[in-house]
Image (tube, coloured by chain):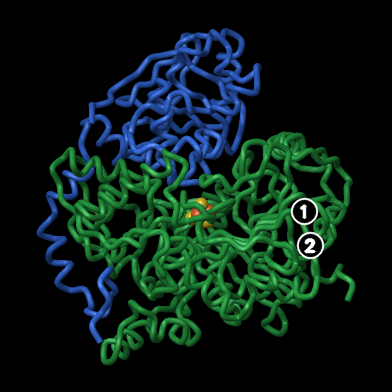
Chain colours: A blue, B green
Amino acid sequence: MRPFKAHAGIGVPLRRSSVDTDQIIAAEDTKRITRTGYEDALFATWRRNDKSFVLNHDAFKAGSILVAGPDFGTGSSREHAVWALMDYGFRVVISSAFADIFRGNAGKAGLLLAQCTQSDLDTLWTALESEPGIAITVDLTSKVVATKSFSCGFTIDEYTRWRLLEGLDDIDLTLRHVADIDAFEATRPAWLPSGKVAPV
Amino acid sequence: MTQDESRIAADRARSPGRTLADKIWDRHLVRAGGTVNGVAEPDLIYVDLHLLHEVASPQAFEGLRLAGKKVRRPDLTVAVEDHNVPTLDIHRPIADLLARSQIETLRRNCKEFGIRLYRIGDIDQGIVHVIGPELGLTQPGMILVCSDSHTATHGALGAFAFGIGTSQGEHVLATQTLPMTRFRTMSVTVTSTNGKLRPGVTSKDVALALVAQIGSTGGQGHAIEYRGNVIRGLSIEARTTLCNMSIEVGARVGMVAPDESTFAYLAGRTHAPKGGQWDAAVTAWRELRTDDDARFDKEVFIDADELTPYVTWGTKPGQGLPLSGSVPDPGSFQSESDRAAARQALRYMGLEPGTPLREIAIDTVFIGSCTNSRIEDLRAAAEVLRGRRIAKGLRMLVVPGSMRVRKQAMEERLDEVFGAAGAEWRMPGCSMCIGMNGDRLAPMERSASTTNRNFENRQGPGGRTHLVSPVVAAATAVRGTLSSPEDLED
Ligand code: SF4
């Protein structure tokens, strides 16, 4: 994973709450076996059917920071939702609340989720809507989100932040503890199931 | 922290008792989280069983291959074909080339890495959350994961089971562990005077009532334990329905402490322990309960004496009401975000405020999914349909959760009851719960569905979903509008 220190880009206001992963990417579009190539599938129904949808405005098309309503990413665990956001070009999602599984998936894939207060979110929305296409900078080192006229802090769990800043791979981090895993396995009771049928 | 929360936190610190969820977590600690470079590290927990399906796994295996890694414990990994599989003509090659390629990829990966796979047509094949308990793979006290958000279903047997994403799946394949921060705990206590639900009320209605009561984030970040006399009286299958919907309140885990019903359910199942191992296992399983002096981080109570069948009217599982109610006026909600969500939902659902729910006409009835496709669900629905016909012009699909459920139902001749009523009897799979295999709603088509999500476009682009229990689904099929069995004439 590439280290993530800071990012600047066009902010996209998505004034909807509880955007579930079925809306981010439909199940039909998760039938592929690759990890990339999902950019067209992102918010496909809204982009196709709703002219007023934010990503259909020229000013926002090249956006890379999504500013979304609370409870973003609820529903299905499909990680394709994170991949679709990243394939489209998003590097950061700002919201006042994220769903848990989505948060885990984003952390693994390197999509930064910056959590701010609802009132800061409202201010950001107003700024982005009154001047479509303006840039936001997100600094992971100082945990600050800023436009040219406004700035606020954000929260992220410190472990994920550290991994993102260093660009560390989670699996390799765990494999440093392989001796602990071996030791634990030796203590597991014999009756626990396995894919093989237990002998009678 | 609210005052309440800090009181609970203080109580917890004082009280030595542990919850069931905490006991299972502690038993699976490979390494308690420490500090690295001044940053708090999560715990490393061991995974007893990892279930896979065709949709979320290809990229996990690909990641392993690219990194030159192996599957650490193929014997603790089991795969099944379910999300994409056709429910008709299963012996022909799958027509949908993308679905076919996902399934072929899973077969190749399982072969390469030595993982047991239940393929289409196999007697042990079915929806991943149906076959786990059914085969005795799911057992009390385990930590079980699957790249699917409804994994909490397995908590019905006292397993600590949660959904993960594809990268986390790759992590488990490579290490059989996950770095995780402990979930907070929450109790949902369901009680009634006599410990029973009223006639015609099911655990699905309890689940829908819970989501309506606390909303889609009311359990966020929590492991739920369902307790109370009503829960004790529920069959294991009824418990799976309730645990299944835990994610719809945002909870990661939903579980019931194992009891005699659990042991009776598991005894003799394919992967359940045998002989002396069985006795040792039951002895250990009996310890799996929350201490009397343990405290939960959050507590919710449901009074089941007044509970009647629930249906949803909107596009979030929490947008539900008793069937006797009417479509709500968006203006009646307290917060602006709830009002906006209700307006959006009614627009999508094509509903007018004030319409009695019982008058909403339905085009398609779907009985199936990991929520409600087990033998007891099919029996209950068939009982309502016996000797009746479904309404003219209505389509009804019955999709058993697994090959074994299908076989059992056919031995009881339930397929004939469904057939005589005018319903279609299919092969097992996720089917119209998610519409990936082509079983789906047309735009604006309206369903009463025993599934768990009524999200926009979930059952097909533009499709409109009302979540219901199996008996409400069956009664609805007969009358053609949302109905409970009480509404049917003899
Ligand atoms: S039946 Fe539906 S909810 Fe259950 S695993 Fe399949 S797609 Fe997911």
Is residue B326 in view from this perspective? yes
The residue indicated by pointer 1 is: B394
Q: Chain of mark 1?
A: B
Q: Residues within 10 Å of mark 1 (few under 14, many from 20)?
A: some
Between marks 1 and 2, how big is the CA–CA gap? 7 Å
Q: Is residue A13 above or below residue A78?
A: above
For label 1, the SS is loop
Q: Residues within 10 Å of mark 2 (few under 14, many from 20)?
A: many
The answer to whether B347 appears left or right of B168 in the picture is right
A62 or B416: which is nearer to us? B416
Provide residue A109's location: percent of width, then percent of height. Answer: 32, 35
The numbered dot on residue B101 is none
Three-letter residue code for mark 2: Ile
Three-letter residue code for mark 1: Leu
| The CB of the residue at mark 1 lies under 8 Å from ligand 1 | no
Q: What residue do we see at 56% from left, 35% from top?
A: A23
The residue indicated by pointer 2 is: B390
The answer to whether A177 appears left or right of A7 in the picture is left
Query: Residue B334 occupies which quadrant of the picture?
Result: top right
For label 2, the SS is loop
Q: Chain of mark 2?
A: B
Give yes or no for contact between labels 1 and 2 (Cβ–Cβ under 8 Å).
Answer: yes
